Image (cartoon, grey):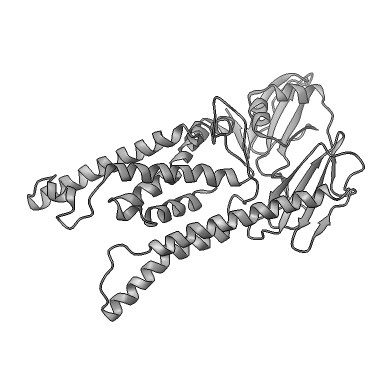
Amino acid sequence: MEPVTHFLTGACIGRAGFNRKTAYATLAAVLAAEAADLDVIWSFAGPVEGLKHHRGLTHTFWAVPVVAGAVVGAVWLLDRRLKARRRNADGAPSFSSADEKGGSGRQPIHWGWLYLTACVAALSHLLLDWTNNYGVRPFFPFNPRWYAGSFMFIAEPVMWALLFVALFMPWVLGLADREIGARKQRFRGRGWAIFALSAMLVLGCWRWAEHAQALAMVNNTQLTAEPALRMAAEPYPVNPFRWHVILETPNFYQTAEIDTRVGTIDSDPRRDVLYKPADTAAVEAAKQTPLGRVYLDWGTWAVVREVGPEAAPGMEPPNLPANRVWTTVEFTDLRFDYSFLATRGTAGHAPLGAWVYIVDGHEDAGEAMNGREQR
């Protein structure tokens, strides 16, 4: 999932009851819910390194207690700094038993509860990322396999709405209470937070059921003349009934648009068939490049084809003597090669596409992904 969903989910986890157990619960939950995406720093080393390490070690079960510990450590440092400021401001001791027990009027800190809060929020990151079609490797490096639920789009506006309402409504109701002079509630919004998290679970279960229904419809329909070796159903945002289905046969891939609400399958062999490209010398060489190895490890529906002397996005063509020949090899993943807004046809290059320049059928002369060159 994108960061907004992770941050808001963490906020709701903190306000669902953990904030009644310890101070800083919501802060710790927000930080831990997004901390796994710190692996984005690898992208500064180039797009290939970014792809190689994204959703790697930080997105494993082993990382959860480490991430939670790091977040609690950061909160501890913040707490010490705030206490030092209070001491400097009013001359009071930086730490007192009254603060620890809440006798000063401040919410007391219970570090065990704070660590548990951070662990739950860190686990929520893995769960949310598993639901979409990019997937996670929760047992990496012992098991490098990717696991993907593929029933939730990576950016889901319905989730945004649920989470925003859960965090916004308590503030609105608090304003209304102050207008009528009602007593201020110390912990407000637990019911709304629990509602949002429960609704997210219901939405996920609903989408999971529709995903299974889409695959069952394809299984019960003869879409191709050749037997299907495997199939996948990819989600659209907002609409839980709309699915993009991919089938692989020995010689080609075929796609279909599924509507589980009305039970329709839209697939035209003249329009929706992609024949498997030939394994040329350039293609085989591209697969052995650093980009090729990383891409094929991640791209469970990868298609690699030679496109000829065509400049790749974000790259200059190689400057070579006239007696040397270069060609571009393109990598795409069919899981993302469709229009996310449910309109037929796409403009430009597929998301998460990659390119390699191969010289004389064997030499790597440059790599790029998402319009960025690997240097």
Q: Quadrant of residue 183?
A: bottom left
Q: Residue at x 26, y 70 (%)?
A: 184
Q: Nearer the viewer, residue 51 or 78?
A: 78
Q: Residue at x 20, y 55 (%)?
A: 106
Q: Nearer the viewer, residue 138 or 92?
A: 138
Point out residue 363 in the picture as x, y percentages from the top left corner.
71, 19
Quadrant where the C terminus sits is top right
Q: Residue at x 50, y 58 (%)?
A: 198
Point out residue 349 in the picture as x, y percentages from the top left corner.
71, 44
Point out residue 328 in the picture as x, y percentages from the top left corner.
75, 30
Count of marks, rendered view: 0
* Furthest-right residue in this view: 225
Question: In the figure, is residue 40 to the left or right of 280?
Answer: left
In the image, is residue 69 above or below residue 320?
Answer: below
Q: Can residue 128 be seen here? A: yes
Question: In the figure, is residue 168 to the left or right of 318?
Answer: left
In the image, is residue 98 above or below residue 289?
Answer: below
Point out residue 119 in the picture as x, y percentages from the top left corner.
40, 41
